Image (tube, rainbow, N blue to C red):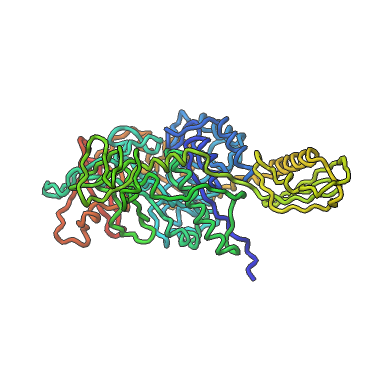
Amino acid sequence: MNSQKPRPLELLAPARDTETARQAILHGADAVYIGASSHGARSAASNSVDDIRGLVDFAHPYRARIYVTVNTIAYENELQTVERLLSDLYRAGVDAIIVQDMGILRMDIPPIQLHASTQCDISTPEKARFLQDAGFSQLVLARELTLNEIRTVCNTVNVPVECFVHGALCVSYSGRCHASLACGGRSANRGECAQICRMPYTLYDGTGRIVMRDKYLLSMHDFNASRSLADMVNAGVSSFKIEGRLKDVKYVKNTTAYYRQLLDRIIEENPQSYCRSSYGKSDISFTPDLDKSFNRGYTDFCLTNRRNSDLASTLTPKSLGEVIHDTASLNNGDGISWFENGQYTGVRVNRIDNGKIYAAGNKRISHGITLHRTYDVQWEQMLSRDTAERKIAVSMSLDAKGLTLADERGLSARVCFSPTTDIAQKPQNRRGVFEKTGGTIYQLRDFTDSIGETVFIPNSQLADLRRRGLKALDTAAAASYPFRYRSVEDLKSTFPAKRLDYRANVSNSKAASFYKEHGVADIEPAAEALRKSLNGCSVMTSRHCILRQAGLCLRDNKHARPPYSIDNDNNRFRIETDCSRCEMSLIKL
């Protein structure tokens, strides 16, 4: 007999603001990650501490958790600001802080849980074990890992492992991309990525011959691990993260609802092994469809094939949307797109007449072209309305002295009353009174009534009893919230490397002290702190290889002519490959 408790599975949704976060929770998220007022890796998605405090109050009754991103590197003159911010967030009741800068572990901060951001580049079991020993409560793995590599990490650590399952992909290992900094001074490690990977580039061989002109060689397809979700669960992943802190609320509604359904199915099929990590059933009024949300075409990246050769959307960085098989399904105002002779065109539909599309700007659409719908006006209008409710199931038992309540969170409450009674002229529908839980997070599941049918109690007294009972449950929930504290750092643990160069992003004295205390002997400051020129330096390492996707893999193609390079305007990079690891690096020229 297996006495082991089921492992909680967490669906983690993004939010650019607190309203989006609320919608994510209503649509089934077990946790939400959101930016604070500063030092988040998405500088355009910041929120005040007061707003986050209100979000915490909304989330915690469901036992949904709020994680706040403070995951950029901090400069020396910002350390006190970050320290104050973390204390303010702790007092606001947030559940964890997602961080990159190890200097935070040397700050005077409250015992709030810390999660190691994907910016920490957790791509080996050794790095994962060290960060666990350093006191991190959850580890966000690099998106580049295969299922087997994920399984190895999960078997190495005892803390929950978090993996991305959906959304935009960085072409570089996160935390190791300095291309934006090298080309324009905007650092991804400071939340200011200029997304130069979404620009067109020309590829040259070693003789200077143009191999490909003006293609989006670094623009990755979007990640979609939905088909491998069960395999990720089996590998040991506990938290499933949707990317998208810059996405709108409709995107978050759709993707959250979609992955909620998938995870629920896995849990229902394996109730002895897995369980949800929050409470409340979400009633969704639409059928989620990932193809209807922004996407550049989908890939499962390296999950099932480390040498995946179709990772980049080389023809456009824009959304591809869903393929249209019948023009009758189009509506006035829809956005459509197509490729013709390798060129992307996108327009709005003015009207449809007998299957013929009349497009804005009188754009002509050639016969036989594959059409994509990039904007579904009816879908967007539908998602603009209220599309979900989330209710916690509660059982109520009525007797002559009061009401006993018990809910799915394991909480109970008892409220008493001294009712004014009379002889009932007809059977009283008392259950109907207690079912009226509108305006609360509760929904009546079971109701027992031990008061005889011959007794009449005014509905107003029953309604007051119901309100007081549900309020008592709220009070019990707030008093019993399972706040988790940070683990103790093992000061004897040793970092896996003895030397760190600029790519380790050590930007302040506290971070340097942390690494030195864990055995690192030689530390080069972060490029951002040094303001050093990165010409001649590696500014990106990727499991996407331009040469492999172009059919020019140096290991397989005898006719390849290295060294290859790419350029865009004034930015030029040399391509270097590590075929033993199937990785590509870009060197700034």
Count of marks placed on residues: 0
Q: Position of residue 246 (x, y in %)?
A: 42, 38
Where's residue 367, x and y in %? 20, 49
Question: Which quarter of the rendering shows the C terminus?
Answer: top left
Residue in front for this viewpoint, 139 or 442: 442
Image side of residue 81 versus residue 374, left or right? right
Q: Residue at x 62, y 45 (%)?
A: 62
Considering the image in quadrants, where does the N terminus appear?
bottom right
Q: Camera-side residue: 438 or 519?
A: 438
**Which residue is more in the foreground, 504 or 522?**
504
Residue 482: x percent and y percent? 66, 46
Residue lying at 77% horizontally and 46% vertically, measured from the top left:
413
The residue sitting at 60% across, 64% down in the picture is 272
Q: Nearer the viewer, residue 48 or 297?
A: 297
Residue 93 appears left or right of 461: left
Relative side of 410 to 87, left or right: right
- Asked where in the image residue 61 lies, by quadrant, the reply is top right
Say whether residue 586 is visible.
no
Can residue 45 be seen by looking at this rendering? yes
Q: Which residue lies furthest to the bottom in this view?
A: 1
Residue 189 shown left or right of residue 368 in the figure = right
Would you identify the image quadrant in which residue 502 lies?
Answer: top left
> Where in the figure is residue 181, as x and y percent of width and height?
32, 36
The residue lying at 59 percent from left, 48 percent from top is 487
